[in-house]
Amino acid sequence: MSESFIKAIEKINSFINDIVWGWPIIILILATGLLLSLRTKFLQLTHFKESLGTTIVPAVKSLGKKKKKDRVNSVSQFEAFSAAISGTVGTGNIVGVVSAILTGGPGAVLWMWISAFFGMVTNYSENVLGLYFRKKNKSGDLSGGAFYYIANGLKWRWLAYVSAVFCLFAAVGMSGVQTNKISGTVSGALDKIFDFSSLGTVKLIIGIIVAVIAGAIIIGGIKRIGKAASMLVPFMSLTFIVMSLIAIGMHADNIPGAFGLIFSKAFTFKAAGGGVLGYTFATVIRKGMARGVFSNEAGLGSSVIAHSASETREPVKQGLWGVFEVFFDTFIICTLTSLTFLTTFDLDTLTGMEEDTAMALKMFETNFGSFGVAVYSVILPLFAFTTVLAWSYYGEKATEFCFSKAGEKSRKAAVIVFKAVYITLIVFSTLITSDLIWAIDDTFNGLMAIPNLICLIALSGLVKKITCNYFARKRGEKVEPMLSAYPDLNEEFKEDIALGHGE
């Protein structure tokens, strides 16, 4: 492939990326969140306590309990949540947040919070529509996602196919992006110990190991992915949370100053000059909003694919998991990263030219020395690995949808081909040195949002209706349950709930 051809692709992708992650889309994402917040009467506030009470609290209590025999092939609500959040809680929560501060200043953190506040109800709405329009095949497997509610809710099947194709390419790109980060982090850590003459072979070996482990999990489908994620996500998240809290505690005197910078630099209307503080208001808000969306994926229509495989028959109950998902991803993980960085470093000593990955590592090394480097070298690859698992399922379901009009054999063959390509790319992506694949995947991630946001706005009234229906029944009112868009499935789900399944 000639250098001129690569440059042409980079130029085209850069143009598209500036549009995809530019002001129009960011405003559209924020406007969608505001509209959904108004239509649900700011559910992310009024029902936040219930979100915790019906999601993470009972999930923790039920850990270790055997799942009831069911007539649908599903995963528990917690496993569906773990699979979904493993796709959102990734390297972007550490490296990405550091990048946002370096390129947009500490004020970007406030706009990250603002995007997450509205993103909580956006993610909620995606899950509600995802479960309401999901399908069940002859084997009892449940499939859902943005392409399903675009096709069956908005009735724009052509746009649903566009959404599925964007998801498919984003998933393939994510395999390369995350594995590249795994091989780079692990090989770099090993090189400090063994001082390798060449890292190429080491990276390839790491890629093969990751591919074998990932392949064994991916082949097992959402059930195996959900189980793996439900074990890895709590471990890596708790480890990161504890390390961050210790680091922040070590610099407790700097906490007020860190919050001061976040709020005072969020409305910087002209360049302030000096280090990372020299950013215009436009840069601050764009970096913060874009990073928030990229981190929690609210509006992209990705995590809803995993949530749609949940055993619950109630769309609103899984929707409340979406509220907690964004809260956990941004208000907890991203905030801890931000505070750790801002309390550890004196921003006046930075030039703004620092590399985000190196600074993320330095953040751990400065606070914990070689132990911090070791922990970072474990946590970051785990974040990346669970993202690889989640996006493999997203790509699988996108492939299924693209071949939904084909025969059963053709559809299964297409899924097998996708999994084979996905696992193979895990190996070879370790050798990629160009940033092009990162940039292209970033673009496809953003392109997924456009058809999804159009549909969320168009179906916002339905989200309100399903939400009101659920809480009316919770109050004891005798109304017909809205569990599925399809009458036969709605009746089946009503019977299941009466039998104690998927409540």
Image (cartoon, helix red, strand yellow):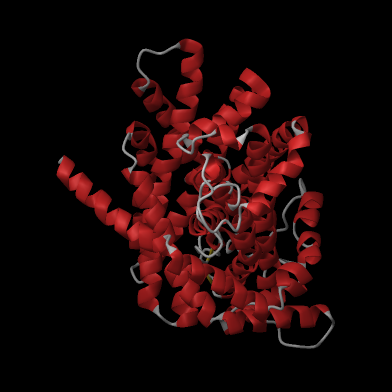
Q: Quadrant of residue 499?
A: bottom right
- Image spot of residue 339 (x, y percent): 68, 42
Total numbered labels placed on residues in the image: 0
| Percent coordinates x, y for residue 274 in the rendering | 52, 40
Q: Is residue 30 above or below residue 247?
A: below
Which of the pair 434/470 is nearer the observer? 434
Residue 65's place in the image compared with 15, above or below, is above
Q: Position of residue 269 (x, y in %)?
A: 54, 59
Residue furthest right in the image: 476
What's the residue at 70%, 58% (across, down)? 324
**Residue 408 is at least partly visible in this image:** no
Q: Position of residue 362 (x, y in %)?
A: 57, 28
Foreground residue among 478 and 84: 84
Residue depicted at x 44% and y 29%: 184
Residue at the (71%, 74%) spot, across then down = 42
The one of 262 and 478 positioned closer to us in this rendering: 262
Say if residue 47 shows up in the picture: yes
197 to 307, vertically: above or below? above
Q: Quadrant of the C terminus?
A: bottom right
Considering the image in quadrants, where does the N terminus appear? top left
**Residue drawn at x 74%, y 50% as measured from the top left:** 66
